[in-house]
Amino acid sequence: GKFNLDLGTDILPDSLVSSFPIALDSIRIQFSSEESGIVDAFGTVKMQGKDTDVLREKVQVITDTKLFVKVPFVGWIDASQFLGGGGGIPGGGLGDFLGRDTSVVFNFYSQANKEILVSAEFGIDNMFRSVTFADIGGIVSSTSDQKLIAESMSCFPNPASESINLSIKDVKADQYMLVITDASGKIMQANFETIQSNWSKQIDVSELQSGTYLIQMINKNRTQSYTTKVVKI
């Protein structure tokens, strides 16, 4: 899979734009992913007090995030090499957001219903990342868990006229893209953040027109997001 996010250069820090030796028209962030898997085992999963016959699928997921810049009369140029891996152009956090990531996901399918009961993700170094499981015993559902994550992002003051303060407690450590969109879905601002634990940031909204805006934090692998809304007066 692959999709592009095209943005104006006005969302980039001046230090980053001035580092390019040529004028830029716009930028494009390209997300792509490749998945390949095989059902490699049959067994039993004991979960929530029940034994269930399952098929295990091992899936390798490779994600790649690149930055392209559009140069007048030339077209799109891949600028990822300049921003990632300690390149010569300061990325202001953007460089950490770019690059390839490989993970291994184990999906356990119910033999009877052919539905995923458990999905566990590991890094290429076999380090555990996350787990998602179905509710087959009356416990909290994944829908409720997602609601709790969404509520963990706060915004004040709200409504606001000049600036807002965003904060997230106990955020999952990763590289994130912060995006502000208007009611039509148009991107008004975009920034890149490297987050370890608790996070807070002040955002200038003085140049935005009056209205309601959606603020979203999306991690590098697009497996985690936090959202809130703000009213600009």
Image (spheres, rainbow, N blue to C red):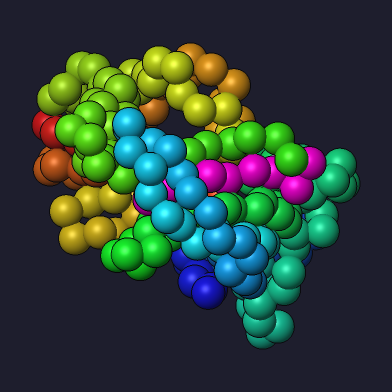
Q: Residue at x 38, y 49 (%)?
A: 52
Looking at the picture, how far across and down is residue 111, in whole percent?
39, 64
Q: Is residue 228 above or below residue 24?
A: above
Residue at the farthest bottom position: 73
Q: Is residue 213 visible?
A: yes
Residue 170 or residue 52, whichever sits in front: 52
Q: Which residues are magenta?
A: 117-125
Q: Is residue 125 above or below residue 197?
A: below
Q: Is residue 8 visible?
A: no
Q: Main secondary structure of the magenta part?
A: strand
Looking at the picture, how far across and down is residue 123, in whole percent?
69, 44
Q: Quadrant of the C terminus?
A: top left
- Is 68 contained in the magenta span? no
Q: Residue at x 70, y 83 (%)?
A: 74
Quarter of the rendering containing residue 13: top right
Q: Residue at x 26, y 22 (%)?
A: 155
Q: Is residue 76 left or right of residue 218?
A: right
- Is 122 contained in the magenta span? yes
Q: Is residue 217 left or right of residue 9?
A: left
Residue 57 or residue 213, whichever sits in front: 57
Q: Is residue 155 left or right of residue 30?
A: left
Q: Residue at x 65, y 53 (%)?
A: 104
Residue 193 or residue 19, whichever sits in front: 193
Q: Is residue 139 above or below residue 90?
A: above
Looking at the picture, how far across and down is residue 200, in whole percent?
44, 17
